[in-house]
Image (spheres, helix red, strand yellow):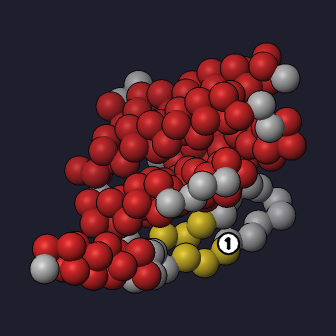
Amino acid sequence: MRKTILTFLLSIFLFIPQLTLADVNSESTPSVKVKVEKMSNIIDRFKEKITLFFKFNSDEKLDYQQQLVEQRLGELDYVIRTGQGDFIEEVSSRYAAYVGRLSESLLSSNNNVKKEQVLEMFKTHPKILAKMRDNFPANSGFWLLLQHDINTVQIYSDKIQNSK
């Protein structure tokens, strides 16, 4: 009975659509690729962990992790756009953690094609983060959090570049 209930709950988490996503294209300046209409909650992140666990191909795992980094950047943009300052610290640190997870997985995989894709993504993210950061007074708490994210992307970008 417990197995049946657990299997049912697990299948619900896996098959419920995740966030509402829409592509945002801007040719003049880089912008967030994934537009998020709500912050992910603990159930969404649990579904992401389960989905990642069931990705057995390393390329699929890397693709999914890259998608999650884009999603976290979209959440950060959403929180700033909607003025939800209480969540900036949480979302900012979550973004940095996902950048780190993707980068560490990439470094252990030795997939040069994926490294190039991630390096291209990491070239645009600091520009987007800098635009977000500039919404706040210099050296304020929120400004420093976003600067930390920019530094994190740069550090991991350098690590990936040096591993090629």
Q: Secondary structure at mark 1?
A: loop
Q: Is residue 115 above or below residue 84?
A: above
Q: Is residue 8 above or below residue 162?
A: below
Few, some or many residues within 10 Å of mark 1 (<14, 14–19, 20+): few
Q: Nearer the viewer, residue 143 or 32?
A: 32
- Does 83 sit left or right of 32 as displayed? left
Give the image quarter of residue 103: top right
Q: Residue furthest top?
A: 162
Q: Nearer the viewer, residue 67 or 49?
A: 49
Q: Tell how many labels.
A: 1
Q: Is residue 30 above or below residue 163?
A: below
Give the image quarter of residue 46: bottom left
- Does 71 sit left or right of 25 as displayed? left
**What residue is disc 1 on?**
24
Q: Is residue 116 above or below residue 40?
A: above
Give the image quarter of residue 152: top right
The image position of residue 157, as x and y in percent, is: 70, 28
Q: Residue at x 27, y 82 (%)?
A: 8
Q: Residue at x 82, y 60 (%)?
A: 28
The image position of residue 114, as x and y in percent, is: 79, 44
Q: Residue at x 79, y 17 (%)?
A: 162
For the C terminus, give its image quadrant. Answer: top right
